[in-house]
């Protein structure tokens, strides 16, 4: 199994989107999550057939179910890393130890965490941020290309082999 460990803020939203939302008076979860960023994530998921695992602090907020429902509307179903004292690196390692059938993974985040060891840092695709002050640009096409490059495309003949 291939896995995309996913942060939310700074990945599925951006400074530009949050400014736009104010002018358009968008309500609900869509006021915080850019549908175009979800579509980019969906492309990466479809191309690689990766499972998405939320690492974001969103996974334990009141918005978590709305987020999961929104992602599900686009065919993205997510698992969650466990909570270990806000140590994202330890949370990812624990999830990996509980799910031993992972062949490869990437971490999509706009931050590097102190709890990331060398292995996790080598798997990080760092999304541009606003130098720690804002959300930055969020997920871009070039980031999706990097996800696909690192995880590899799921080829059609592999799908046919599995179905036999």
Image (spheres, rainbow, N blue to C red):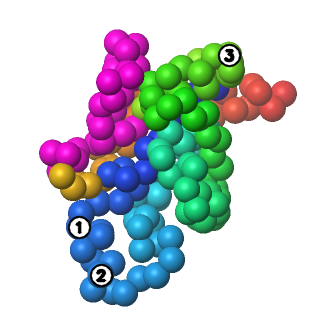
Outermost residue, left side:
131
- Is 70 situated above or below 22? above
Mark 1 or mark 3: which comes first in sequence?
1
Q: Position of residue 91 (x, y in %)?
A: 53, 28
Disc 3 designates what residue?
Answer: 100
Disc 2 designates what residue?
Answer: 22
Mark 2 crowdedness (10 Å alpha carbons): few <14, some 14-19, many ≥20: few
Image quadrant occupied by the N terminus: top right
Q: Where is residue 109, by image quadrant?
A: top left
Quick check: is 109 in the magenta stretch?
yes
Q: Is residue 15 rendered to the left or right of residue 34?
A: left
Badge 1 vs badge 2, beta-carbon distance below 8 Å: no
User: Where are the magenta residues, as a range?
Assistant: 108-132
Disc 1 designates what residue?
Answer: 16
Q: Is residue 156 rendered to the left or right of residue 85?
A: right
Image quadrant occupied by the C terminus: top right
């Amino acid at each position: 199994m291939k896995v995309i460990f996913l942060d939310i803020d700074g990945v599925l939203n951006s400074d530009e989107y949050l400014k736009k939302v104010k002018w358009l008076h968008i309500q609900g979860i869509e006021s915080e999550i850019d549908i175009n960023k979800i579509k980019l994530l969906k492309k990466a998921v479809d191309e690689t057939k990766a499972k998405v695992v939320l690492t974001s602090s969103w996974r334990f907020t009141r918005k978590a179910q709305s987020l999961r429902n929104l992602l599900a509307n686009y065919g993205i179903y997510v698992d969650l890393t466990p909570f270990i004292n806000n140590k994202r690196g330890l949370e990812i390692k624990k999830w990996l130890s509980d799910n031993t059938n992972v062949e490869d993974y990437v971490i999509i985040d706009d931050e590097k965490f102190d709890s990331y060891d060398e292995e996790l840092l080598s798997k990080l695709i760092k999304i541009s941020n606003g130098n720690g002050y804002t959300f930055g640009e969020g997920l871009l096409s070039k980031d999706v290309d990097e996800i696909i490059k690192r995880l590899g495309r799921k080829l059609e003949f592999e799908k046919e082999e599995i179905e036999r």
